[in-house]
Amino acid sequence: MDNDSLTQRDKRVLWHPCTQMHDYETLPLIPIRRGQGVWLEDFNGKRYLDAISSWWVNLFGHANPRINAAIADQLQNLEHVILAGFTHEPVIDLSEKLINIAPPGLAHCFYASDGSAALEIALKMSFHYWRNHGEVKRTRFINLANSYHGETLGALSVGDVPLYKETYQALLLETITVKSPDCYQREAGESCADYSARTFAHMEAALTKHAGEVCAVVIEPLVQCAGQMRMYDPIYLKLLRQACDRHRVHLIADEIAVGFGRTGTMFACEQAGITPDFLCLAKGLTGGYLPLSVCMTTEKVYQAFYAEYAARKAFLHSHSYTGNPLACRAALATLDIFHTDDVINRNRTLSAQLAQATARFSDHPHVAEVRQTGMIVAIELVKDKKNRTAYPWQERRGLTACRHALEQGVILRPLRDVIYFMPPYVIKPEEIDGLAQVAWQGIDRACG
Ligand SMILES: *Cc1c(COP(=O)(O)O)cnc(C)c1O
């Protein structure tokens, strides 16, 4: 078996995610045979550094021996059981541990399989909370411009990336969309904190105008990942928590991409010292092994649903694989690695190395900005550096840079003209340097 024969079979029967399938007439589709640490290997024996953690899910490398062992052990006992009316040790252990490490005040865990589903749960729970309290006029959500929360209809509704959303607009909930605190848009000489704080006026105005009809504000704390890795200051989250309390509106924090150490702390909300009413987690939760997501919430929300059955207050939402034991064991092994290997502290060195390796990129004539939050570095390519004029999207410059990287054995995936590194936490310093080298060449080729 080689790359070509598998590619041909694939194209006859598959339809790939987030892909114009026609692209595969000119772009290579790469069948992967095995993974080890930060490396993936294709069927021709070529190796690739997984610099995007396989779509932001992998934390401790492919084929991690400790996560492998946990799943194998669980397989001997119980692969799955219905979670309504039944329970099991892995899901109880995991819930206790998550409640221990999450911002204080989150007290109950509701599981699903994908990030989008966790968002749907948060949206429905928030709406249903107000309804159970007789506040039936609250039917709307406030979101940020350029936000991303997933692809199912509810999650897509509270997102704001036109590329994914525009087509389906007629099917979606109508949200109240507020200017993003995105520091890329700050004035020359203005600090990121000042800009984010100043932008909050738009949120305050929306809350003042709409509070009585709003269930919740939905945000991605600190980094709008799918929205081209745009970043903002924790001050915004502090102001938002205070305003949500003042206006009696829920705060939903979507840490699906930024949770589990990506921003330098276990959860991004920690950097603002806040607790959201709902915390959505997925992606890194299982270390990148199995689909598992969770929507965590407070005792107060939980109690709004707790009543005699006849009161008809229950949250009758479910997914077939809710709390799957194998996925829970992968998550437990992942949390165990965080604990025993002091990962958050050790990542400080890695993120300093990422900063060092990418420092020179800001001098590149077609790089408008290099930005970093913890273990995420983003490099924004522009046609004109002075005015930050973007390249026409049809030119797909970011893609050209990433194609070069792929030839050189590095997996990058552009967000339009933003190249980013979001590597597993087991990447080595020399691998970071190699990665930066290849990205530099790719950018030169794309912008030359
Ligand atoms: C990926 C992502 C989602 C959706 O998660 P899926 O598992 O792909 O459904 C939601 N929110 C954010 C911030 C994400 O990055």
Image (cartoon, grey):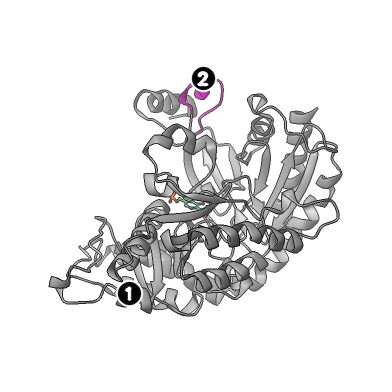
The residue segment tinted magenta is 20-31
Q: Nearer the viewer, residue 347 or 189?
A: 189
Q: Residue furthest front?
A: 209
Query: Callout 2, which amino acid?
Result: Glu
Image x and y of residue 93, in percent: 36, 76
Q: Which residue is mark 2?
A: 25
Relative to 271, does residue 119 appear above or below in the rendering? above
Relative to 434, does residue 104 appear above or below in the rendering? below
Q: Which residue is mark 1?
A: 302
Crowd band around label 1 with a 10 angstrom C-alpha radius: few (<14), some (14–19), many (20+):
some
User: Measuring 84% from the left and 48% from the top, which residue is drawn there?
Assistant: 360
Query: Callout 1, which amino acid?
Result: Tyr
Image x and y of residue 364, in percent: 84, 40
* Mark 2 element type: helix
Q: Earlier in the sequence, mark 1 or mark 2?
A: 2
User: Measuring 85% from the left and 38% from the top, which residue is drawn there?
Assistant: 386
Relative to 438, does residue 60 appear above or below in the rendering? below
